[in-house]
Amino acid sequence: MDDYANKFQRLQRKTDANGRTPIANVVRQFLTGLNPTIAPMVYATAPATLQAAIDTAKRYEAGFMMTQPKTSNYAETEVTGQLEVLTATVQQLLRKKEEEAYPRPNSNNNRNNNCFRCREPGHFMRDCMSEKVLATWKSNQN
Ligand SMILES: [Zn+2]
């Protein structure tokens, strides 16, 4: 902003050495090079001189920066946050899949469901088809 104002003032002095250009035109020319968010606000204050326009623009720019804090950082924070959520979701899914593939033998779900006959988890005594038990049953039959 300071850079632009300085360049514009230098250019203005060069192109209008006699100061004949109406100040309104100079100001409008200055505003066209400004941030399009700030330019209309500066224009609305109808600055009487180029210096007034520059001062007003600087003030608005400072206020604008305050209300729009570091756009790029904000986007980064948002992306990082989304990544964290995504990572957590994926880890949760992986854990779930792992538990389905390799059920923990000592998990509470199985502890009380062990077969009373063969002590194997996953079925009740009335559904027991363990070969050990079948063998015992067969040998008892013979
Ligand atoms: Zn069993």
Image (cartoon, rainbow, N blue to C red):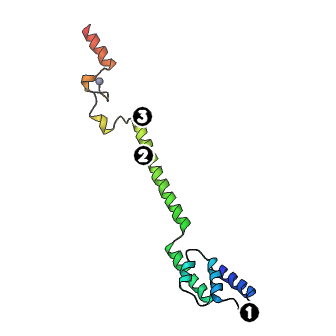
Query: Residue, x 32% and y 27% (percent of image)?
Result: 120
Task: Give the distance between the C-alpha atoms of the residues marked 3 and 2, in whole angstroms.
Answer: 14 Å
Image quarter of residue 124: top left
| Observer-nearest of 14 and 55 | 14
Q: Amino acid at mark 3?
A: Ala
Query: Residue, x 34% and y 36% (percent of image)?
Result: 106
Tell me which numbered mark, 1 or 2, is placed earlier along the sequence: 1
Provide the secondary structure element on which disc 2 rests.
Answer: helix
Q: Position of residue 32 (x, y in %)?
A: 63, 77
Instruction: Please indicate whether residue 80 sits to the left or right of residue 51 in the image.
Output: left
Q: Is disc 1 in contact with disc 3, using a CB cutoff of under 8 Å?
A: no
Q: Residues within 10 Å of mark 3 (few under 14, many from 20)?
A: few
Provide the secondary structure element on which disc 3 rests.
Answer: helix
Q: Position of residue 76 (x, y in %)?
A: 53, 61
Q: Which residue is mark 1?
A: 18
Q: Is disc 1 in contact with disc 2, using a CB cutoff of under 8 Å?
A: no
Q: Which residue is mark 2?
A: 92
Q: Amino acid at mark 1?
A: Asn
Q: Which residue is mark 3?
A: 101
Query: Residue, x 66% and y 89% (percent of image)?
Result: 22
Q: Is residue 118 above or below residue 90?
A: above
Q: Residues within 10 Å of mark 2 (few under 14, many from 20)?
A: few
Q: Amino acid at mark 2?
A: Gln
Task: Give the distance between the C-alpha atoms of the residues marked 1 and 2, in whole angstroms.
Answer: 74 Å
Tell me which numbered mark, 3 or 2, is placed earlier along the sequence: 2
Q: Residues within 10 Å of mark 1 (few under 14, many from 20)?
A: few
